Image (spheres, grey):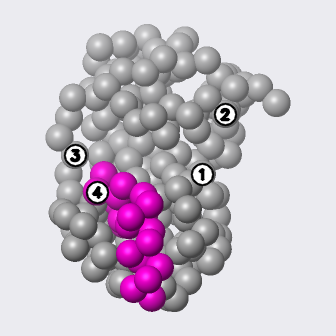
Amino acid sequence: MRLILASASPRRRELLARCGVPFVTATAEVAELTRHEDPLRLPQINAERKAGAVSEQYPDDLVLGADTVILFNGTVIGKPRDPADAAAILRRLSGQRHQVVTGVSFCCRSQGIKKTFPVISEVFFRPCDETVIERYLAAVPVLDKAGAYALQDHGDWLVERVEGEPENVVGLPVCRITAELAAMGLPAAK
């Protein structure tokens, strides 16, 4: 049984490669939901949709889908519309705590595998003045990033600490995925 990552994200490919399990990628052609009555379920639903779509094409393989959202005071913060919106998002997060929730879904139609779960990390932002925000936005392209920041790109300018798996904040909780793959008989390299 091959492992297929249902994602075009280079960050997710890089993170999954750290697990030590061979995999291939396939892009899921599904529209992502941006709202749901239960914000914790939103990334799980999107991950299920991605894994399910790719699993239709590859029913004998184990497909991994993932989706990550930022939750701040119970509200989903998506990708910024423009640089002004990015600055406004960073001002809101400044000195505050928020959650990064990644929905993870495994699907293999022929084996009857369908498992979906969330992984949550707490991110604590430093108080950021306008100088820090302007410097960050000048250094890091954020229009494609939920929450208008990337932990892996000068994240220490904004983030004081992360409680939980830091890779989850980047987009894929590799520790949990490694454990799940081992439980399914696909042991990761040590």
* Residue 186 in which image quadrant: top right
Q: Earlier in the sequence, mark 1 or mark 3?
A: 3
The disc labelled 2 sits on which kind of residue?
Arg
Name the residue beneath numbered marker 1: 167
Q: CA distance from mark 1 to mark 2?
A: 11 Å
Q: Earlier in the sequence, mark 4 or mark 1?
A: 4
Q: Look at the numbered discs 1 and 2 and tell me whether their residues touch, using CB distance below 8 Å.
A: yes
The mark found on residue 18 in the picture is: 2
The disc labelled 4 sits on which kind of residue?
Leu
Q: Is residue 97 visible?
A: no
Tell me if 156 is positioned left or right of 108 in this view. Answer: right
Q: CA distance from mark 3 to mark 4?
A: 17 Å
The disc labelled 1 sits on which kind of residue?
Glu
Mark 3, secondary structure of its residue: loop
Q: Earlier in the sequence, mark 1 or mark 2?
A: 2
Bounds of the magenta segment: 129-149
Q: Is residue 86 magenta?
A: no
The mark found on residue 143 in the picture is: 4
From the top left corner, tell me how far across and down residue 174 is, in percent: 62, 43
Name the residue beneath numbered marker 3: 32
Q: Nearer the viewer, residue 186 or 135?
A: 135
The mark found on residue 99 in the picture is: none
- Mark 3 or 4: the one toward you: 4
Q: Residues within 10 Å of mark 3 (few under 14, many from 20)?
A: some
Q: CA distance from mark 4 to mark 1?
A: 20 Å
Q: CA distance from mark 1 to mark 3?
A: 22 Å
Q: CA distance from mark 3 to mark 2?
A: 26 Å
The residue under the point 29% across, 70% down is 86
The residue under the point 39% across, 85% down is 130
- Mark 4 or 2: the one toward you: 4
The residue under the point 31% across, 25% down is 27
